[in-house]
Image (cartoon, grey):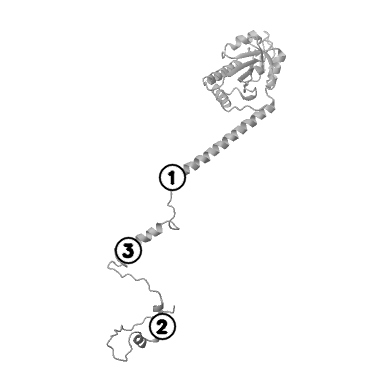
């Protein structure tokens, strides 16, 4: 559109009573306006009609207060409406919290599952390593403190706490057997756990015959089973668990001390060595460890 120029011509009143021959209407306007203004008028006539401009009200703003507030409210509503028009409103807060809770619970469950799977795999790997060590493998032939023959296979299917010592031991063996007996009592208090068999095997078969072992085990747990045998049988049983035992020099009364390994062994129901406890362990610590082994035990395939 060509640029428009402001025309400052007075408004003409055209009367119907003009003299004959006097141009009227558009013809008269064309005769009175200059050519430049005529171009402006033609451009205005060709342009689409513009929206009416509101008049300035007494409040110093365009339009009335009602029109201003309605226009502002319409603009604010249009700006606050979701983009795209007609979109879905946002979820309520409780629904968003529920979604977050479900997703968090799923993630926590997956993490716990992976942790349990790793723990099972760790136990299987440790059991395989213990089996490869061949600790406690094989069988033994001994006599219990009642004179009955006993083999390792007799205890298969039972949990066993096993200790090697001798009846003439002045302090270490009694302390360890007291600790073993107390750990068994703590585990017996939990009726949900399987029974545990305590065993005592002598490393001094020359002095510890069946009668001596029977007198000795009476001072400890009532289910403590004492085992003895010939020197060869005892040596074979101790060697299966890599127990060191060596008699010291005899004194003038013929008495002597046996230096030996001080360890309590834990055997699983399959006869496999699972754990051991040294002198630094308390009865409560031993009981807690045995309980964990019982609760997480998974037999290995043969």
The location of residue 178, given as percent across then percent down, is: 57, 17
The percent position of residue 112, horizontal first and vertical second, equals 54, 36
Counting residues from the N terminus, which is met first, the one under dot 2 or under dot 1?
A: 2
Marks 3 and 1, the one that precedes in the sequence: 3
Which residue is drawn at the image coordinates 40% and 57% (left, top)?
A: 80
Image point (60%, 12%), residue name: 217
Q: Is residue 140 above or below residue 16?
A: above
> Which type of secondary structure does the marked residue at label 1 adopt?
helix
Tell me the residue that label 3 is attached to: 68
Q: Residue at x 66, y 18 (%)?
A: 153
Residue under label 2, please give it.
39
Q: Residues within 10 Å of mark 3 (few under 14, many from 20)?
A: few
* Neighbours of disc 2 within 10 Å: few (<14), some (14-19), many (20+): some
Query: In 3D space, how far apart are the residues under numbered discs 2 and 3 (Cα atoms)?
Result: 37 Å
Comes first in the chain, label 2 or label 3: 2
Is disc 2 in contact with disc 1, using a CB cutoff of under 8 Å? no
Residue 95 badge:
1
Give the mark toward the camera: 3 or 1: 1
Kindly check if marks 3 and 1 are in contact, taking CB atoms under 8 A apart as contact.
no
Q: Secondary structure at mark 2?
A: helix
Q: Which mark is residue 33?
A: none
Q: Quadrant of residue 151?
A: top right
């Amino acid at each position: 559109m060509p640029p428009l120029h402001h025309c400052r011509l007075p408004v003409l009143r055209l009367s119907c009573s003009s003299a004959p021959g006097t141009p009227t209407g558009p013809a008269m306007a064309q005769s009175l306006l200059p050519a430049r203004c005529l171009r402006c008028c033609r451009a205005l006539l060709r342009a689409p009609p513009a929206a009416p401009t509101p008049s300035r009200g007494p409040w110093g703003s365009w339009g009335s207060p009602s029109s201003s507030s309605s226009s502002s409210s319409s603009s604010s509503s249009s700006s606050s409406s979701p983009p795209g028009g007609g979109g879905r409103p946002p979820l309520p807060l409780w629904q968003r919290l529920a979604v977050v809770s479900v997703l968090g619970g799923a993630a926590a469950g997956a993490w716990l599952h992976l942790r349990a799977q790793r723990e099972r795999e760790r136990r299987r790997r440790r059991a395989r390593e213990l089996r490869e060590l061949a600790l406690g493998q094989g069988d033994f032939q001994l006599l219990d403190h009642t004179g009955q023959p006993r083999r390792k296979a007799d205890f298969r299917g039972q949990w066993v706490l096993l200790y090697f010592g001798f009846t003439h031991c002045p302090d270490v063996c009694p302390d360890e057997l007291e600790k073993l007996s107390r750990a068994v009592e703590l585990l017996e208090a939990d009726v949900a756990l399987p029974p545990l068999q305590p065993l005592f095997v002598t490393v001094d078969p020359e002095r510890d015959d069946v009668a001596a072992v029977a007198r000795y085990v009476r001072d400890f747990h009532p289910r403590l089973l004492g085992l003895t045998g010939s020197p060869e049988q005892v040596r074979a049983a101790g060697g299966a668990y890599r127990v060191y035992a060596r008699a010291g020099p005899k004194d003038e009364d013929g008495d002597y001390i046996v230096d030996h390994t001080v360890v309590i062994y834990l055997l699983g129901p399959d006869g496999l060595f699972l754990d051991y406890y040294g002198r630094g362990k308390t009865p409560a610590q031993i009981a807690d460890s045995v309980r964990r082994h019982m609760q997480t035990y998974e037999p290995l395939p043969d």
